[in-house]
Image: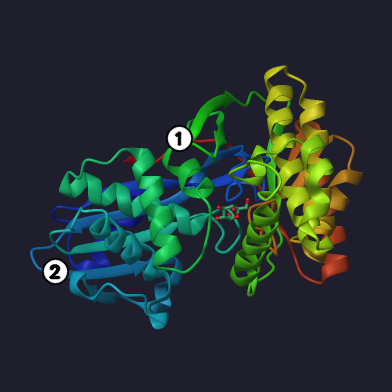
Amino acid sequence: MKETVLNKFKEVFGDTEGAKVFFAPGRVNLIGEHTDYNGGHVFPCALTIGTYGVARVRLDRKLRFFSMNFEHLGVIESSLDDLKPEKEAGWTNYPKGVMWAFGEKGFKVPSGLDILLNGNIPNGSGLSSSASVEVLTGFILREFFGFEVSNQDLALIGQFSENNYNGVNCGIMDQFAIAMGKKDHAIFLDTADLSFEYAPVKLENAKLVIACSNKKRGLGDSKYNERRSECEAALAKLQKVVDIKGLGDLSEEQFEEHKSVIGDLVKERRARHAVYENQRTIKAVAALKANDITQFGRLMNESHVSLRDDYEVTGAELDTLVEEAWKVEGVIGSRMTGAGFGGCTVSLVKDEAIDTFIKQVGEAYRKKIGYQADFYVVEIGDGPCIL
Ligand code: GLA
């Protein structure tokens, strides 16, 4: 891949003088969905697929971008003096947003850059291709300009840029999982205070299989923000009767005791998901540590049911993928992953069942939904690096 991106950089920008090659992973969340903006726990991991980038510093303030995933757009030019979201600029809003965010945090980017990207995460799949580009950009800026920021800061700046430059009110999970990724480990992160722990994911005779629904996301972002405000409204009501900072502070019992104060059945279901999913995540990590993979899988399945019925972020495509997966012998657990409304599912599948899984779930999906799903057997990888 290094050679491919360097060759393309040379073709697009003339030569590779001063250029360096970088990589930032994508991520998949194993359990703990829609908990990260509710002060709950998440359990994601970085993947070995992600975004490759070639970058070099310019002498002027110009920014030139090229993506091998959107070749038809050609070279997109901008300037450090003109960092504002532009609809026509599409994907460049992610790297530009991060440059803007560095400036807001007191790290002014001193000179322009030529940047070429090539991602092997399926686009819009819910494996965080955008957070991968954000963390990659931050990593590039730190490398070239020596900004004193940690990998955790790269995650926070990425999230800040997505919230304030791109208008998506996302939590910290994606950027954190990518910036802090560790091979063969998932990250048990408490989003209330960012304390975290690496938990080894030793899958004997099983693998993580991602099924991409290929459903175009469309309304996803606005629905995402809607769920977020439903949770905030429920929290505000609960805070009148219990002293909590987020829904993640509640146990299941406390929630059942106080839920009537929410006064709206839809918001009550959203909050129930947030509370129970957080507790499920804590239990799932305990199960994994105890080597009880069957229990881990069961909790993954329960997570999907809750996202389907209480949080309502699945839809026919993700439900079909998961419900068909549950029918296959050798599937330990299966659930939607990421924001939902399209995107991917993640399944724990025994080695000997993987071929059947892909065939059976793939056929049923095509029959019911009318188009194809794509399958990826993935591995857990490290965070960003220079190649
Ligand atoms: C998206 C957001 C994350 C998180 C998930 C849902 O991926 O970017 O912050 O909220 O959805 O768990």
N-terminal of the two: label 2 or label 1?
A: 2
From where the camera sits, is residue 346 visible? no
Q: Residue extending furthest front?
A: 240
| Depth check, front residue: 212 or 316 | 316
The percent coordinates of residue 334 (x first, y second) are 78, 43
Q: Residue extending furthest top?
A: 290
From where the camera sits, is residue 45 visible? yes
Alpha carbon distance from label 2 to label 1: 32 Å
- The numbered mark at residue 91 is none
Q: Residue at x 67, y 19 (%)?
A: 289
In this rendering, position of residue 279 left or right of residue 12: right
In this rendering, position of residue 188 left or right of residue 65: right
Between marks 2 and 1 in the image, the one whose residue lies nearer the viewer? 2
- The numbered mark at residue 382 is 1
Q: How many marks?
A: 2
Disc 2 residue crowd, few under 14, some 14–19, many 20+, Cα 10 Å: some
- Mark 2 vs ligand 1: CB below 8 Å: no
The percent coordinates of residue 31 (x first, y second) are 68, 40
| Depth check, front residue: 361 or 257 | 257
